């Protein structure tokens, strides 16, 4: 059976000046990026912001040293910069989002201009784990997916998109990804307004859009 696409939603007539910020969290490989991208497609005039674009830039380290860093710990991210950038959006100002090179574990020299929009979709494994970042979110979503499915998705993605070997992906998963998920990502689920079972993209997007409508109706 082919499911219908989620309904389109145009929020541009909303009277409130500050954007509605939707945070989407979940473990690596949970499907949160798929849901975030589906929301971007379904909502007119939406800005997409990725937490993992804000990994600390550490060019003073060798590639081997950077490869051994724990990228699943909150301290690996420059979250304060992201908080300031989201603050700029709330003031109606654009900002330059960094571009992170995952193959080399370093920021590139490029950036992406994020313009003010009525809705902002913020996505990342730890977007609900940081209080300052969490306080900026109007709607908090957690995508809850079984660990074996998350690992399979991460293996496929990192090998195909990031030039990794299966051995390196599994080693990183056991050393940092799984422990940090247990310590930081999974506990952040308690802050979510809505918990989405992994894989339910169409129903999830329709539900989130209805919640956006409700929040906007209250804030208009």
Image (cartoon, grey):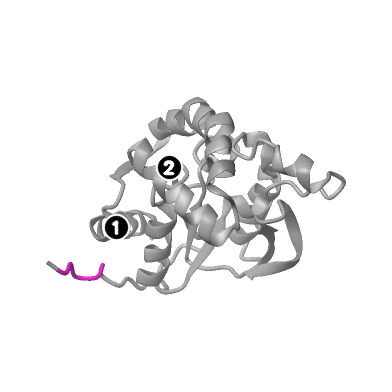
Compared with residue 18, is residue 69 higher up or lower down, i.e. above or below?
A: above
What residue is rendered at 38% in x and 63% in y? 39
Q: Residue furthest left?
A: 1
Q: Which residue is mark 1?
A: 201
Total count of labels: 2
Question: In x, y percent, where is residue 14?
Answer: 41, 68
Give coordinates of residue 134: x percent, y percent. 52, 40
**Is the residue under label 1 in contact with that under label 2 (CB below 8 Å)?**
no
Distance between the Cα atoms at labels 2 and 1?
Answer: 19 Å
Pointer 2 or 1: first along the chain: 2
Q: Which residue is mark 2?
A: 151
Q: What quarter of the picture does the C terminus occupy? A: bottom left
Residue 23 visible in the shown view: no
Residue 18, horizontal then vertical, whole percent: 52, 59
Residue 39 visible in the current orientation? yes
**Residue appearing at x 55%, y 61% in the figure:** 161
Give me the residue at 75% from left, 43% from top: 66
Residue 13 quadrant: bottom left
Q: Main secondary structure of the magenta part?
A: loop
Residue 59 image position (x, y, % from top left): 83, 50
Residue range in magenta is 2-6
**Between residues 47 and 152, which one lies in front from this camera angle?**
152
Quadrant where the N terminus lies?
Answer: bottom left
Q: Is residue 51 or residue 28 the one in the foreground? A: 28
Residue 171 magenta-drawn? no
């Amino acid at each position: 059976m082919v499911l219908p696409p989620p309904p389109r939603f145009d929020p541009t007539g909303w009277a409130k000046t500050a954007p509605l910020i939707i945070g989407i969290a979940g473990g690596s490989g949970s499907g949160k990026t798929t849901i975030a991208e589906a929301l971007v497609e379904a909502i007119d005039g939406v800005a997409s912001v990725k937490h993992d674009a804000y990994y600390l830039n550490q060019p003073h380290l060798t590639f081997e040293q950077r490869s051994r860093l724990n990228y699943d710990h909150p301290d690996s991210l420059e979250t304060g910069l992201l908080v300031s950038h989201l603050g700029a959006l709330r003031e109606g100002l654009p900002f330059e989002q960094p571009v992170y090179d995952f193959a080399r574990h370093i920021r590139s020299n490029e950036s992406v201009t994020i313009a003010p929009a009525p809705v902002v979709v913020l996505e990342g494994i730890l977007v609900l784990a940081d209080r300052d970042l969490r306080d900026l979110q109007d709607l908090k979503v957690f995508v809850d997916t079984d660990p074996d499915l998350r690992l399979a998705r991460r293996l496929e993605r990192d090998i195909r998109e990031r030039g990794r070997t299966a051995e390196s992906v599994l080693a990183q998963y056991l050393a940092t990804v799984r422990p940090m998920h247990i310590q930081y990502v999974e506990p952040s689920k308690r802050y979510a307004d809505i918990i989405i079972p992994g894989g339910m993209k169409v129903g999830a997007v329709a539900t989130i859009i209805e919640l956006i409508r409700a929040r906007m109706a209250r804030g208009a």
